[in-house]
Amino acid sequence: MTPEIQKKVAAFVGKHGMENPLPIHLLDLHSELGELSKELLKSSAYGLTSFTPGARWHDELGDVLFSLICVANSTGVDLEHALDMAMQKYASRIARKGDPGSGE
């Protein structure tokens, strides 16, 4: 079953004619992550001050989430299930070796 947030994004995308092939959604996600990273750099004076999230941070994080949901919807991935699986994987690694890293 698709989570409600994914249905909400799918309806918005359909209503506004924003359907695109997967490569476009993936490139958009990458672009939005770059904008989020740039906001962190600007908000911290390129690491010279402590980072405090502001309105732009929230906007950019929302854009990243929207783009990620578009990628998931384009590939038929249930994000809630994917997140559950990721947390199980990390919990297993922590139990096995004390940290969540893959070590690869």
Image (spheres, helix red, strand yellow):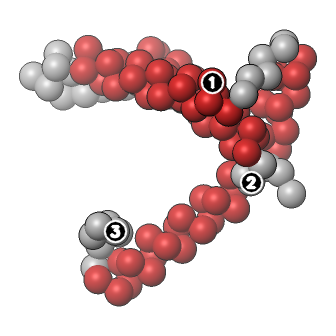
Is 34 left or right of 51, judged from the image as shown?
Answer: right
* CB contact under 8 Å: marks 1 and 3: no
Give amino acid for label 3.
Ser
Whether residue 88 can be seen here: yes
Q: Quadrant of residue 35?
A: top left
In what element is the residue under mark 2? loop
Residue to which mark 1 is pinned: 24
Task: Return the disc, 2 or 3, that comes first in the chain's sequence.
Answer: 2
* CB contact under 8 Å: marks 2 and 1: no
Whether residue 57 can be seen here: no
Residue visible at 25% across and 21% down? 41
- Spatial CA distance of label 2 from label 3 is 23 Å
- Spatial CA distance of label 1 from label 3 is 29 Å
Q: Quadrant of residue 8?
A: top right
- Please provide percent x and percent y for residue 96: 35, 86
- Please provide percent x and percent y for residue 103: 27, 70
- Please provide percent x and percent y for residue 51: 25, 27
Residue visible at 38% across and 78% down? 93
In what element is the residue under mark 1? helix
Is 73 left or right of 16, judged from the image as shown?
Answer: left
Numbered badge on residue 52: none
Give amino acid for label 1.
Ile
Instruction: Identify the image quadrant of the N terminus.
Output: bottom right
Numbered badge on residue 102: 3
Residue to which mark 2 is pinned: 78
Give amino acid for label 2.
Asp
Q: Given this view, does label 1 or label 3 mark the residue nearer the observer? A: 1
Q: Nearer the viewer, residue 59 or 32?
A: 32
